[in-house]
């Protein structure tokens, strides 16, 4: 039987057998205090070189408190070392003859012609695994249950339960057939209380769809 699962507001949820914690693994909800971020319960990030005090900047360095765009991450996501979210606030204007942002060095007036219009928000679904060194591009909409491979550069609309690899990132296959994906999205196990999730851990991780539907 599982032990005592950590609460979603615990800072360092990974505890070694000797009782020490892994300082480079955090539940993001406990360490992100930023008006442009929204993070779901139990989503964690791991790194070999943890930032001392600013995980928001570490993961999304261009998303400032004054930025117009937002970053939303669902529940139970897994974010590996070296991942970065390149939000719309990092964009340059590229529809003219120059991409140079003259205005940022001269008063930073958002109405200046060298600055782009406000870009789209970024949204990461639930139970998304983002592999080592991956990049999510401005406006990326990553569906539930997706796996972003190590080093991939993903953007645009990524359907649920996709596997994305490469640069530019491409969907190489869907993890399950369309009917199974539809049933999984309807079940949405990540919305259940943690005790219920743990009680059906074998079905969730062992792909027992019938048991999950009965539990739902």
Image: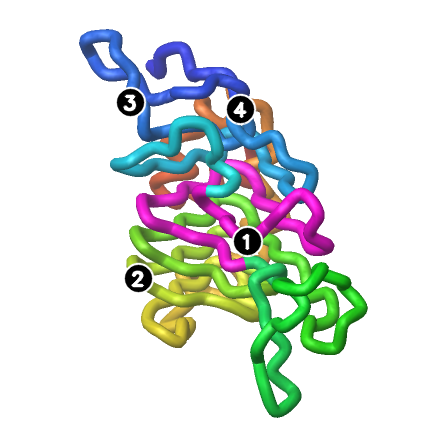
Q: Earlier in the sequence, mark 3 or mark 1?
A: 3
Q: Residue at x 68, y 76 (%)?
A: 114
User: Along the horizontal axis of the image, is 145 left or right of 150?
Assistant: right
Q: Which residue is mark 1?
A: 62
Number of residues whose C-alpha sits closer than 10 Å to that of mark 2, classed few (under 14), some (14–19) or many (20 or more) = some
Q: Residue at x 48, y 33 (%)?
A: 54
Task: Reply above or below: 43 against 145.
Answer: above
- Tell me the element at label 3: loop
Q: Choose mark 1 or mark 4, whichever is in front.
A: 1
Q: Earlier in the sequence, mark 2 or mark 3?
A: 3
Task: Reply above or below: 59 against 5.
Answer: below
Q: Residue at x 37, y 39 (%)?
A: 205
- Tell me the element at label 2: loop
Provide residue 163's location: percent of width, then percent of height: 39, 63
Q: Residue at x 67, y 43 (%)?
A: 65
Q: Earlier in the sequence, mark 4 or mark 2?
A: 4
- The magenta segment is 58-86
Q: Quadrant of the C terminus?
A: top right
Foreground of the two, 105 or 151: 105
Q: Which residue is mark 2?
A: 151
Residue reaching furthest to the front: 106
User: Along the horizontal axis of the image, is 118 left or right of 1?
Assistant: right
Find residue 118 and name its label: none
Foreground of the two, 121 or 174: 121
Find residue 30 and name its label: 4
């Amino acid at each position: 039987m599982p032990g005592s699962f950590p609460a979603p507001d615990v800072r360092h949820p990974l505890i070694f057998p000797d009782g020490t914690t892994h300082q480079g693994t955090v539940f993001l909800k406990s360490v992100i205090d930023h008006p442009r971020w929204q993070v779901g319960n139990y989503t964690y990030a791991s790194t070999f070189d943890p930032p001392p005090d600013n995980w928001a900047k570490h993961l999304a360095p261009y998303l400032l408190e004054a930025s117009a765009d937002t970053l939303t991450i669902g529940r139970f996501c897994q974010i590996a070392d070296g991942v970065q979210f390149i939000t719309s606030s990092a964009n340059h204007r590229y529809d003219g003859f120059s991409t140079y942002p003259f205005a940022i060095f001269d008063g930073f007036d958002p109405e200046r012609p060298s600055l782009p219009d406000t870009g789209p928000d970024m949204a990461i679904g639930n139970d998304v695994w983002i592999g080592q060194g991956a990049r999510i591009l401005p406006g990326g909409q990553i569906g539930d249950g997706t796996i972003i491979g190590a080093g991939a550069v993903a953007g645009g609309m990524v359907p649920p339960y996709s596997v994305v690899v490469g640069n530019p990132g491409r969907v190489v296959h869907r993890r399950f057939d369309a009917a199974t994906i539809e049933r999984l999205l309807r079940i949405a196990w990540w919305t259940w209380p943690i005790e219920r999730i743990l009680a059906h851990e074998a079905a969730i991780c062992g792909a027992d769809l019938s048991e999950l539907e009965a539990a739902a």
